Image: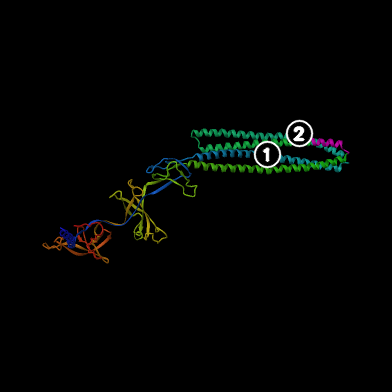
Amino acid sequence: MRALKISLLILIPLLLMAYGGWRAMGMLKKPPPPVRNLTVSRGDVSVKVVESGIVQPLKKVEVKSKVGGRILNLAVDEGQSVRTGQLIAYIDKKEIASQVEQIRAQLDAAYARLEQARTGAGYQSSQTQAQIEQAREALSTAEARLAQAREQARVQPSLTRASIAQAQANVASAQDNVRLLEESTHPQAVSQTEANVQENEATLENYARNLERQKQLQAKGFVSQRDVDSAQTQSDVARVRLEESRKRADILKKQIEVELRNARTRLSEAQAALDAARANAVQDGVRRKEYEAARAAVAQARSGLRAAQAGEAQNRMRLQDVQQAQASVAQLKNSLEEAETRLNDTTILAPMNGLVTKKYIEPGELITSGVATFSSGMPIVQVSDLSKMLVKININEVDIARVKVNERVDIKVDAYKGVVFRGRVSKVGSAALGGEAGQPQPSGVIKFPVEIEIAHPDPRLRPGMSAKNEIIVEERKNVVRVPIEGVSFEGKKAFVELVQSAAPGAKPEAKGVKPAETTQRRAVKVGLKSDIHAEILSGLKAGDKVRPAKFKGPARKGADLRMGPPPEEE
């Protein structure tokens, strides 16, 4: 039993070795593959540049907010179609709305301060002018009194009676002046001013009626808005003129009151001077004192005039107050416009028609402004216009010279086998990718960017799909062609092994070859060449058979080195 086991242990390995040797000898004696015939046919010959890329929309926008805040409502979802102006999201606007109300209140207060400043400036100007006129009159009177007192003091002993007479004349003159002002000069000026006011009132009333008539005619379609605006302008101008005439009338009345008061004052002074002259005719010392008093009165009148003229500085200060109030109003108006704009920006709308391809945030999240921060802001969604799609690819520098704008492109995607989408080259990069021009990319190959626009975007195409792109750089339609492996090239000449029929009864050349087939070496003229076919300009016709060209490279070692897809065989 033990000897049997030992024999089996020795016999089994020997049998396995013998079987392996037999299998190896059988493989070495395997007959060569049968010789194939290639068929010359009519068809298209195309030279293509093939490269893969990613399908993406021609235009896509990341929708961001101009203001920061919390998202209260997100009205769209990923994959949803949107149109221009459609609601995307709402941002909490409580804080901005509060700012708007606060600025509006400040603006109302600024308008009130501006009106107050304008009123004060107008009042100050009128008051200052009246004070200056009054001071000038007082100075004139004081200077006259001074001259009179000086003369009286100089000639007092010999001109007492003349002084009395002069005083009497002064009284009469002052009386005449008061009477003239009361009965002639002032009534005439007042009458003219009132007539001017009445005339302006009548003009305003006339323009107001014309404005109302123009509005009625416009309502009926008889006149244009321009006519109404012109009538409105005339009415506004007439109202301004009426206000000015009324102000002039008020000023005139005040001036008249001042003049009349001064005239009466002069009359009183003249009467007092007459009484003084009569009572103190022999008092030279009193005259001297009167002279000194007149000098003091002149000095005081001059001081009063300077004080009144100093009021013009108050006028300028009042005008500066008006300018400051106007600047405050303008600044607050700008702030209000900015705040209202930010309030409107809390409603985010779609900037274009398209499809929501990405959603970056959820309701309740905080976002930053896209314009008020150092960063670019946080996007809310991405909207892509799928009506125009493209594929971006990178072409090797060896092939870039053959790629031109508007060349036709066949586009295939893995998701739809056998479906070909049409496109065209829309852009060819003028500089290589990567660093400086001419420097290779990390892969060691210099490539140029190329964009391919899809001619008729299909709903089946989605952003991010990988696409194989065949750029047709040259093409011949319906030409005589032969599989490229059937042509051998010797320099600039091309040859084929044309299959011909031999005499009946010929013996087979080898296993797998029909007995009637022979070959003839024939020169052909080749046109366009692709990786699969060669265009035959002369030397062959459709239906001819040729043999694959003999391989002139390294030993094949039993491998089948056919190029491209299976050729057209007999």
The residue furthest left is: 505
Q: CA distance from mark 2 to mark 1?
A: 28 Å
Q: Which residue is mark 2?
A: 179
Front residue of 266 and 330: 330
- With 264 as the anchor, is 561 left or right in this view? left
Label 2: which secondary element: helix
Q: Which residues are magenta?
A: 268-282
Task: Return the mark for residue 415.
Answer: none
Locate the C terminus by quadrant.
Answer: bottom left
Mark 2 or mark 1, which is nearer to you?
Answer: 1
Front residue of 241 and 394: 394
* Above/below status of 437 relative to 390: below
Q: Residue at x 85, y 40 (%)?
A: 287
* Residue 259 x/y as whole percent: 73, 37
* Residue 133 x/y as whole percent: 72, 40
Mark 1 closeness class: few <14, some 14–19, many ≥20 residues within 10 Å: few
Q: Main secondary structure of the magenta part?
A: helix
Front residue of 386 and 281: 386
* Residue 164 x/y as whole percent: 85, 37
Mark 2 closeness class: few <14, some 14–19, many ≥20 residues within 10 Å: some
Q: Amino acid at mark 2?
A: Arg
* Residue 267 x/y as whole percent: 79, 35
Front residue of 265 and 50: 50
Task: Return the mark for residue 126.
Answer: 1
